[in-house]
Image (cartoon, grey):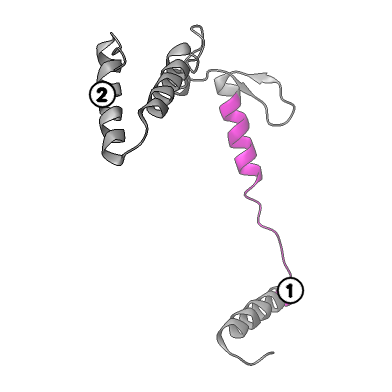
Amino acid sequence: MQERPKVPMLAAVTETVMASLRRFGLHAAAAVGWIGGSVLILGSCPAASLPPADDIPEEVLRNQVVLDGRSAIDNSELSPTEYAELQALLEDSQEVTPRVSPELQRLILLLKLRKILRSVTPLRF
């Protein structure tokens, strides 16, 4: 019989896999190749997926307060008070309601009513 590995964790995993293979009647040489390949792949570079050490975590960046802003008009840098004033000015300018003639309003209402009736009744208008 082959010599067992000296690493305790690897020995436990190997023993578990070998027992499972014996239970299903599979060949032990295939298991040794599979275990050796997985240890080689997993153990070769354990920190490959970690970010660089000087990278700031996203959680920290998400909690930081942004103290400078940019203008929505010309993309210039603004202080927080200037940014708030610009936002208030832009919100006020968007509150204008469009003027629509009563005839056009009636036509829009009739089209909406027609759409509702088409979805409810099988008749086509």
Assign a secondary structure to mark 2. helix
Location of residue 59 by image quarter: top left
- Residue 104 horizontal/vertical position (percent): 74, 74
Give the residue type that dot 1 points to. Leu
Q: CA distance from mark 2 to mark 1?
A: 82 Å
Label 1 packing within 10 angstroms: few (<14), some (14-19), many (20+): few
Q: Is residue 87 above or below residue 107?
A: above
Label 2 packing within 10 angstroms: few (<14), some (14-19), many (20+): few
The label on residue 15 is: 2
Q: Is residue 52 above or below residue 104?
A: above
- What span is colored magenta in the figure? 83-104
The label on residue 79 is: none
Q: Residue drawn 50% across and 14% down? A: 48
Q: Residue drawn 43% across and 23% down? A: 33
**Residue 46 in sight from this viewpoint:** no
The quarter of the picture where the N terminus appears is: top left
Which of the two residues, 48 or 104, is positioned nearer the viewer here? Answer: 48
Say which residue label 1 marks. 104
Name the main secondary structure of what is drawn in magenta. helix
Contact between labelled residues 1 and 2, with CB atoms less than 8 Å apart:
no
